Amino acid sequence: MSSPTGRRVRVAVVFGGRSSEHAISCVTAGSVLQAIDREKYDVVPIGIATDGRWVLEADDPQRHRITGPGQLPSVDADRAPVTLARTTEGTDLVVSDAAETPRALGEVDVVFPLLHGPWGEDGTIQGLFEMSDVRYVGSGVLASAVSMDKAFMKIVLRDAGLPVMPSETVTAREWRRDPVAVRARLSALGYPLFVKPARGGSSIGIAKAHTPDEIDEAIEGALVHDPKVLVEVSAEGAREVECGVLESLDGGAETSLPAEIRITGDHEFYDFEAKYLPEEHTELDVPAVLPEGVEARMREMAARAFLAVGCEGLARVDFFLMPDGALVVNELNTMPGFTPLSMFPQMWAATGVSYGELVDRLLTLALQRDTGLR
């Protein structure tokens, strides 16, 4: 693949970021850097440090991986700063090392943003790319923002006729002002309840409150990560099943074979350790073994959710398969994890799309789409 000038397409792989999912973003980037076809693409790794600084990162997949419990990767903020600079001819990457004259790395054809959580998966950086008139992988500003905010996502999905679990939203302001009223409102949902940062991910800050005595600690824990908290009825006895979605070349949605996550050991739900250090904590069925007719219903609902939110590129739709056979949409992720252990690439591999093909397809889709209103 070549750019309009005949050179290889230049891809800026952007990762890290300011959210609590910084390390997981780095791990995802390491996987993509290792898989991307270097004969087709000129790759420039751009790290965003936890303080928001953009730097020219090392093109070393092994540096961006989890090496053990508590040993998480991060962007090296001391590397040379880099910026996106809009010119009359395109959007360039400019390195501004203090010891050298600023130098341009050349025009960026497409950005692969591998950012999870706020300031990356929530429409903010997508807006920057739109302003810079540079193409990028994944959903646009609105779909990214809606999907990041679990409370608003539920509103959109419910309006599209898709079932979601009952929930209430709690803000830091109302919790501080009148916790008694908040507790009463949550009790009406019925326990047990899951308490989540409304705009978080990777199961960071999530707790299960089995009784009213546990709700205060759960809310305080979630508020550490987000001043807006979603409190949701627990899907007791449900199976957790996921389905991948890819945008088709005609603007529709294609779905993968579903996969199921089964939690083992002492983990009551799919928490951070179970997701990213899963050797002793989870069992994965790829594809999932489902009752007759459930797979077809799930794939149809996943495509509906993707289109209802206005997603582009990719998404992972998570479901609860309830004991009575009903399907409930848990959430939709516009930039699901790409780590070797992540469900999204595993589901597509089982469907016949390899990791490298997946990366290439997403870049191809992004290059075919213009920025701006569409």
Image: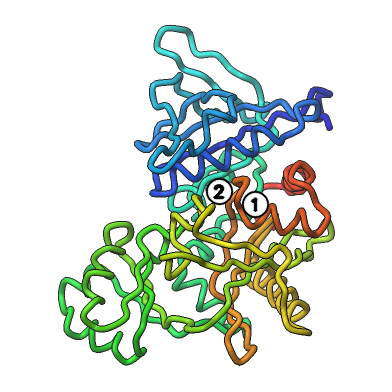
Residue 140 in the image, given as x and y percentages of width and height: 61, 55
Name which residue lies at 82% across and 29% down.
2
Amino acid at dot 1 = Gly
Amino acid at dot 2 = Gln
CA distance separating discs 1 and 2:
9 Å
> According to the image, label 2 marks what residue?
126
Name which residue lies at 42% across and 61% down.
199
Q: Secondary structure at mark 2?
A: helix
Q: Judge whether 317 appears above or below 54 on screen.
A: below
In which image quadrant can residue 74 be found?
Answer: top left
Per the rendering, the mark at residue 138 is: 1
Residue 346 in the image, given as x and y percentages of width and height: 70, 54
Front residue (pair 274, 134): 274
Tag 1 and tag 2, C-beta contact below 8 Å? yes
Query: Is 248 left, or right, of 109 in this rendering?
Result: right
Label 1: few (<14), some (14–19) or many (≥20) C-alpha neighbours in 10 Å:
many
Q: Judge whether 184 appears above or below 176 on screen.
A: below
Precedes in sequence: disc 1 or disc 2: 2
Q: Judge whether 100 appears above or below 260 on screen.
A: above
Residue 282 in the image, given as x and y percentages of width and height: 54, 61
Name which residue lies at 35% across and 90% down.
190
